[in-house]
Image (cartoon, grey):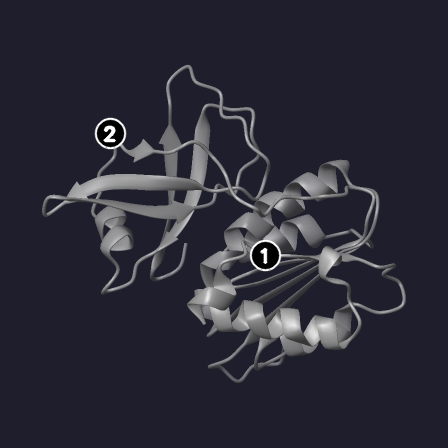
Amino acid sequence: MTPRVKQFILEAGDHTFSYQPGQHVVIKFEQNGDVVGRPYTPVNLPGTGALALGIKRYEDGTASTWMHDRSVGEEITITKPSGNLHLRDLDRDVVFLSTGTGITPMIAMLKQYLSEGSGRAAFLYGERTQEDIMYRETLDHLSAGRDNLEVLYSLSDEDWDGPTGHVQTHLGDVVDERFEDPHYYICGIPPMVVDSEEMLQEEGVDDGRIFTEGWESDAV
């Protein structure tokens, strides 16, 4: 998908996956006598026997390196889907804010919202360069011809004709008076998540309208 991201399709025979779009599974494997587990979020909707996972390889990443070394046909052990990121109100306007691989739960929730929701949606995504943007073709396709969805990419390490810098600083460029008390869903590197929460709170957004996985402030 990008120089460092592969999409993996996990197929589970006659099993049908049931989960709320935005929730994650944990891939588990044994390495050097220890059990390693890392969370990854399906970008596809539930109701099938497959999960599509977009995984970025980090040179010092235990699980991402292990996954990128897998071959077609190998068995992968995963936990049942869980997690705090899922749509709370399909009739409410929504704002999806993410960086890096934090885009994966947002893709799943956006697909559900466009299929079942009734309001406006904004999708803001931050990456380093255009080459690093995940699911750009998917987002461009989903936003084509829709007047209720606006997609914004912000790049931190490349000069281009679009927005630059921290993606959360562009919320005001997209979320205007057309949005009525939207719900905010945020996922990405912990400093971005925490900074976005604080910025929204300063703007008067109630905590009950901001949704994250919930562990990011401890990580910061």
**Residue drawn at (44%, 39%) of the image:** 52
Residue 116 picture quarter = top right
Q: Nearer the viewer, residue 107 or 86?
A: 86
**Residue drawn at (28%, 33%) of the image:** 76
Q: Amino acid at mark 2?
A: Gly
Q: Earlier in the sequence, mark 2 or mark 1?
A: 2
Residue 122 falls left or right of residue 179: left
Residue of label 1: 212
**Label 1 element class:** loop
Q: Nearer the viewer, residue 125 or 219?
A: 219
Q: Quarter of the image for the N terminus: give it.
A: bottom left
Residue of label 2: 73
Cα–Cα gap, marks 2 and 1: 34 Å
Extreme residue in the left direction: 32
Q: Nearer the viewer, residue 203 or 177?
A: 203
Q: Amino acid at mark 1?
A: Thr
Extreme residue in the front direction: 218
Q: Is residue 133 visible?
A: no
Expressed as whole percent of the image width and height from the top left, the position of residue 150 reads 74, 60
**Label 2 element class:** loop
Extreme residue in the top direction: 14
**Residue drawn at (63%, 78%) of the image:** 163
Expressed as whole percent of the image width and height from the top left, the position of residue 99 reads 52, 65
Few, some or many residues within 10 Å of mark 2 (<14, 14–19, 20+): few
Residue 7 falls left or right of residue 91: left
Residue 94 falls left or right of residue 81: right
